[in-house]
Image (cartoon, rainbow, N blue to C red):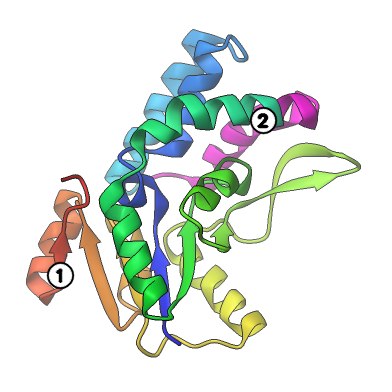
Amino acid sequence: MSLALFDLDNTLLAGDSDYLWGQFLVEQGIVDAEAYEQANERFYEQYRQGCLDIAEFLRFALRPLAEHEPARLYAWREQFVAEKIRPILLDAAREVVEKHRQAGDLLVVITATNRFVTEPIVRLYGIEHLIATTPEFRDGRYTGRFEGTPCFQAGKVTRLEQWLAEHGHGLDGSWFYSDSHNDLPLLAKVSHPVAVDPDDTLLGVAQEKGWPVISLRG
């Protein structure tokens, strides 16, 4: 059984769920629109440039979780998935996932976006396993902090190695699909790296190394 790893944002989705969650919070009046939108744009640009301070970003991104009761957060999340995520699901992504499912591969989404946002999205693709940045939850509420290593850049490798040890799997024959140069540390570890609608930096590396380059955007 081989491992089929998938990045989520801009890979299985035609957009970035973390960024869209921020936009949703602004549109619903849950956060201060001007300040939050400016910060959200700034962090997203840093992510694209590969210079994001992940700890600083997570302090920003997880703060709204600490400010509201979980029941209200889950209701907002359900609305967010319906309004922002379902329209950017990709049929071609479903086909790739299904191809690996039919081959008997073990399907895993591995994403920097936090588990609160991504859990219901991963379920839409019928994928059981999720490795994601983990918001801290204590005494029935989110704290606004995160647990363990953020699942970002080299942290994805760390988190995957922990997961592999816990589940008794290895990377022989493994696949990883990603759009982002931020995932180069993990792409370099797997047997079959695949660049999906890649950013310019990843495209250059993929062409240099002879990795497959595909599009799931039709």
Location of residue 162 (image quadrant): bottom right
Check if residue 61 falls in the magenta segment. yes
Query: Where is mark 1, residue-wise?
Result: 212
Above-or-below relation of 173 to 49: below
Dot 1 falls on a residue whose secondary structure is loop
Q: Residue at x 30, y 76 (%)?
A: 188
Q: Is residue 110 left or right of residue 59?
A: left
Q: Which mark is residue 203?
A: none
- Amino acid marked by disc 1: Pro
Query: Where is mark 2, residue-wise?
Result: 63
Q: Is residue 37 left or right of residue 168?
A: left
**Near-viewer residue (41 or 76):** 76
Question: Which quadrant: the C terminus?
Answer: top left
| Magenta: main secondary structure | helix
- Amino acid marked by disc 2: Arg
Q: Residue at x 63, y 43 (%)?
A: 116
Q: Residue at x 50, y 57 (%)?
A: 126
Q: Give the extent of the magenta segment.
A: 52-73
Q: Nearer the viewer, mark 2 or mark 1?
A: 1
Question: Which quadrant: the N terminus?
Answer: bottom left
Query: Are discs 2 and 1 less than 8 Å apart at CB?
Result: no
Check if residue 180 falls in the magenta segment. no
**Near-viewer residue (145 or 121):** 121
Q: Residues within 10 Å of mark 2 (few under 14, many from 20)?
A: some
Sequence-wise first label, 2 or 1: 2
Q: Is residue 72 left or right of residue 185?
A: right
